[in-house]
Every structure is written in structure tokens, then in C-alpha cells.
Amino acid sequence: MNKYIVRASMVGTCVGGAILLKDYTGGGSCQSKASITGQTVIVTGANTGIGKETALELAKRGGRIIMACRDMGKCENAAREIRGKTLNHNVFAKQLDLASSKSIKEFAKTMINEEEHVDILINNAAVMRCPYWKTEDNFEMQFGVNHLGHFLLTNLLLKKMKESGNSRIINVSSLAHIAGDIDFDDLNWEKKKFNTKAAYCQSKLANVIFTNELAKRLQGTKVTANSLHPGVAETELGRHTGMHQSAFSSTILAPLFWFVVKSPKQAAQPSVYLAVAEELQGVSGKYFNGLKEKKPAPQALDEETARKLWEESARLVHLDEALSECKAL
Ligand SMILES: NC(=O)c1ccc[n+]([C@@H]2O[C@H](COP(=O)([O-])OP(=O)(O)OC[C@H]3O[C@@H](n4cnc5c(N)ncnc54)[C@H](O)[C@@H]3O)[C@@H](O)[C@H]2O)c1
């Protein structure tokens, strides 16, 4: 009899654990069948991982897809692959290096001048736990690319998006934001000892805070802004950590790995959902873990921090000059 109780409780623990893990990994797939024919979508970092799968899924739904990537060779290859798979010929590779304000401004000018409208912007690109590298503009790489680059890009495209009518901005953050802290005295790690993990967490917290402040500033317009955690996925994001998730998958922990870690296609579902779901029309300033709206970490909800981060980011990227240079005021 005891044997059965033990077995039953093991099954119960596994099922309970499974539910918890599913929540942690942000499970679920986008059920919406919405088409986005006629809409223009920009996806940053779209040549690999979650960004590539997001671009593929949105191309299947008929969107005009701009894949905004640093490496044009890889981007052209990915765009060709997506055109071949979906038979959607409106999939384009465009150069964007988020570690360079010059490149961001060039990209924004092209979008402003060449695109009739921009309906969906998915700020997906990121670098994780790299060495102490600096961007072209002398910002710590993770803060510079993950937050400041997207902050500048988004602001330069805002006028265009407001003119486009109902439009959506989606910032791909991470559950890692909960371990983040915004150090206004040393955002770029110039005074204290560099900690690459903390720098990634700071940048991902900045994604959520920026989204909330942006949503507040967009009230009264038809543009919404939301952030998300895509789930833990097997991508190349861990390239600087020396511990690829695929290495983990050949160990005794493989079953756990299989359960916890999503494919890039699964991890693209939250971005796709936030981009297309009809029921999210008008929803703004929210954070999603997978497909479910969740409360972000308390430090992501502090309004004074959000105001300060916006002002400091605008100062660092010379936002006013950039807006007038790109005629985006
Ligand atoms: N994979 C995960 O487990 C996981 C978990 C939580 C959050 N995320 C987030 O998901 C997003 C996508 O990550 P991924 O897992 O697909 O990783 P990935 O490394 O496959 O994709 C990141 C993309 O960003 C691009 N990128 C990096 N620096 C750039 C720059 N300077 N300019 C332009 N593009 C640049 C890369 O080239 C790449 O295409 C990221 O924002 C990441 O923080 C991923």
C-alpha cells in the first residue's frame, strides 16, 4: 500500500513541478489566427534564434517583414530562407547595428523615408554576458545594445508609428530582469568592477522599465508598448558564457532540459501573440511571461526610476539632436 502512496505522491510532485516549470518557462503557443496582411513589421536581431522564428511566423501571416540585423550576409540568407518557406516575397534584410548610433539613425531614416507605415516594432536583439566591451558610442555593450540602442531606435520611429494608426511596440526582456538593478551612478560600469551577469540583468530590467514609461507617454495615441519574457530557449544567446544549453542536453539532466528549455519557435510565440492578438488591441504597459500577463519585479514598477532612466537615456543618446537629424520630431 505504501508503495502506491509513494508512487502517487511522486506522480503528484511531477505534475505539480511540471505546472510550475511551465509557468517559469513561459509556456503556451499563440492560438490567434489573425492575419497581418498589409502591415509592416520590424524585428531586430532577426537572423537567428527567437527573432528569426518571429519573423518567419509573421511572414506566414502575410506581413511585410523588415529583418533588421547587424550581419548583412547572415540576414540575407535568413530572409531568403523565410521567403522560400512562406512564399511571402515581402521579407527584406536591412542593416542595423544597435551598437552604433550612426547605424541606428541610418536605419531609422530609411524606414521613415521608404516605408509607408510601421505597424509593429519588435525590439528583440540582445547580447548576453559578453566581456567588458564598449559600443561605438562608448557604452557598456549590454546596456548599449539591449537598452540604449532600442531606446534610440524606438524614439526615432515613434512619429512614423503614431501616423500609422493602431501600432504595437514589443520589447523582448527576460525573467533575468528580476535580478536587475539600475545603478544611475555607474550605468556603464566605469567605476565599479565589471560583473557581466549583473550588466545583462540591468539591461533586461531597463527593457521593462522603458516599456512602462513609454506606454505612459503614449497614452492618448494609438500606439501600445508591452514587454515580455519569451521563456528559456535553446539559442545562441549563451555564446559568451561558454556553457551552451545544447551541452547540457547530452547529460543525465537531459530530461529536465527537454522539459524546461523551449525551441526558438516555441519561444517566439509570446512575441507573435503580442504582435497579432486581437484581444490585445489597446493593451499597453504590461509585462507578459510567455502568453500570460504577469506582474514584473517591484523595481520595474517604480515610476521615479522610470522617469530618471528615460531622461538619462535621452541625454546619453543625444535624443533631441537625433530626432531633428532624422526629421522624426
Ligand atoms: N534564449 C533564451 O533563453 C532567452 C531567455 C530570456 C530572454 N531572451 C531574450 O530573447 C531575445 C532573443 O534572444 P535569442 O535567445 O534569440 O538569442 P540570439 O543570440 O539567437 O539572438 C539575438 C540576436 O541579436 C542580435 N544582435 C546582437 N547584437 C546586436 C547588435 N549590436 N545589433 C543588431 N543585432 C544584434 C544577434 O546577432 C542575434 O541575431 C533577447 O532579447 C534575449 O535577451 C532569451
Image (cartoon, rainbow, N blue to C red):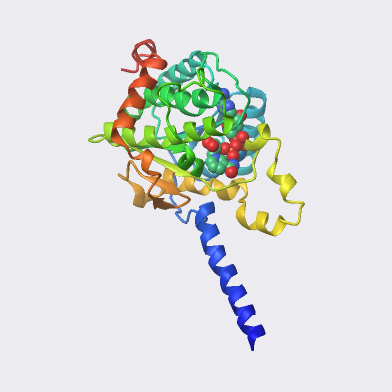
Residue 229: x %, y % from top left: 48, 45
Residue 322 located left or right of residue 86: left
Residue 46: x %, y % from top left: 57, 33
Q: Quadrant of the C terminus?
A: top left
Regarding residue 218, the answer to whether it shows in the image is no
Toward the viewer: 286 or 73? 286
Residue extending farthest front:
192
Residue extending farthest bottom:
1
Residue 75 located left or right of residue 118: right
Residue 28: x %, y % from top left: 51, 56
Question: Which quadrant of the picture is home to ligand 1?
Answer: top right
Q: Quadrant of residue 131?
A: top right
Residue extending farthest left:
220
Q: Say if 310 sits above or below 302 in the image.
A: above
Q: Say if 328 sits above or below 19 in the image.
A: above
Q: Quadrant of the N terminus?
A: bottom right
Toward the viewer: 154 or 60? 154
Regarding residue 314, the answer to whether it shows in the image is yes
Q: Residue at x 47, y 36 (%)?
A: 180
Residue 299: x %, y % from top left: 37, 39
Q: Quadrant of residue 225?
A: top left
Q: Residue at x 46, y 42 (%)?
A: 178
Toward the viewer: 144 or 129? 129
How many marks the image carries: the answer is 0
Q: Residue at x 56, y 23 (%)?
A: 193
